Image (cartoon, rainbow, N blue to C red):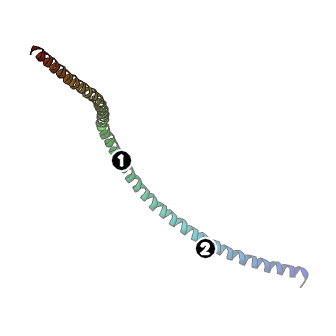
């Protein structure tokens, strides 16, 4: 065996080993591709199920939003109806507050008038008593002169 034949034999063995590794690699790649293919099919099935569920949810949410908008419009209408009531109650509250202030002012003024009236009454009674006293004095003087 010559050096060329040995080199050819080594190249042939290396090529055979390379072919064996490539075949094993291709077998692994085939298994991986089969597994990925199965996973993709399952993912597609899941996506179809989720899409159907989302479509059902979307239609239900849309119906719920329509009902909510109707309810909100109804509530807004009713609130607009009772707004004048709240305005009237607020006005009534202000009127009652003003009436209370006026009543307090009137009581304060009447108290001052009451004091003045009481003083005038006392002065009047003193004057009346003094007048009676002077009238008695005149009568007694007149009686003593006539006797």
Q: Please, is residue 19 above or below residue 98 in the view?
A: below
Left/right placement of residue 45 relative to residue 146 reads right
Q: Quadrant of the C terminus?
A: top left
Kindly tell me whether residue 84 is visible in this rendering: no
Q: Residue furthest top?
A: 146
Question: Label 2 belongs to which residue?
Answer: 31
Residue neighbourhood size for the residue with mark 1, other residues' Cα within 10 Å, grouped as few (<14), some (14–19), many (≥20): few
Image point (46%, 60%), residue name:
50
- Whole-percent x, y for residue 121 in the image: 23, 26
Left/right placement of residue 3 relative to residue 73 reads right
Image point (30%, 40%), residue name:
78
Q: Are marks 1 and 2 in contact (CB under 8 Å)?
A: no
Q: Residue furthest front?
A: 147
Q: Residue furthest left?
A: 147
Q: Nearer the viewer, residue 102 or 89?
A: 102
Question: Label 1 belongs to which residue?
Answer: 68
Quarter of the image for residue 49 reads: bottom left
Q: Nearer the viewer, residue 22 or 61?
A: 61
């Amino acid at each position: 065996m010559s050096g060329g034949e040995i080199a050819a034999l080594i190249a042939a063995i290396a090529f055979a080993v390379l072919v064996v590794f490539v075949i094993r690699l291709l077998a692994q790649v085939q298994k991986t591709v089969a597994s990925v293919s199965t996973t993709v099919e399952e993912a597609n099935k899941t996506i179809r199920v989720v899409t159907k569920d989302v479509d059902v949810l979307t239609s239900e949410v849309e119906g719920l939003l329509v009902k909510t908008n109707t309810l909100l419009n109804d509530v807004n209408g009713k609130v607009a109806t009772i707004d004048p009531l709240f305005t009237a109650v607020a006005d009534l509250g202000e009127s009652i507050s003003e009436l209370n202030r006026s009543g307090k002012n009137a009581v304060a003024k009447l108290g001052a008038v009451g004091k003045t009236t009481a003083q005038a009454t006392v002065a009047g009674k003193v004057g009346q008593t003094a007048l009676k006293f002077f009238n008695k004095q005149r009568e007694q003087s007149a009686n003593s002169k006539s006797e």
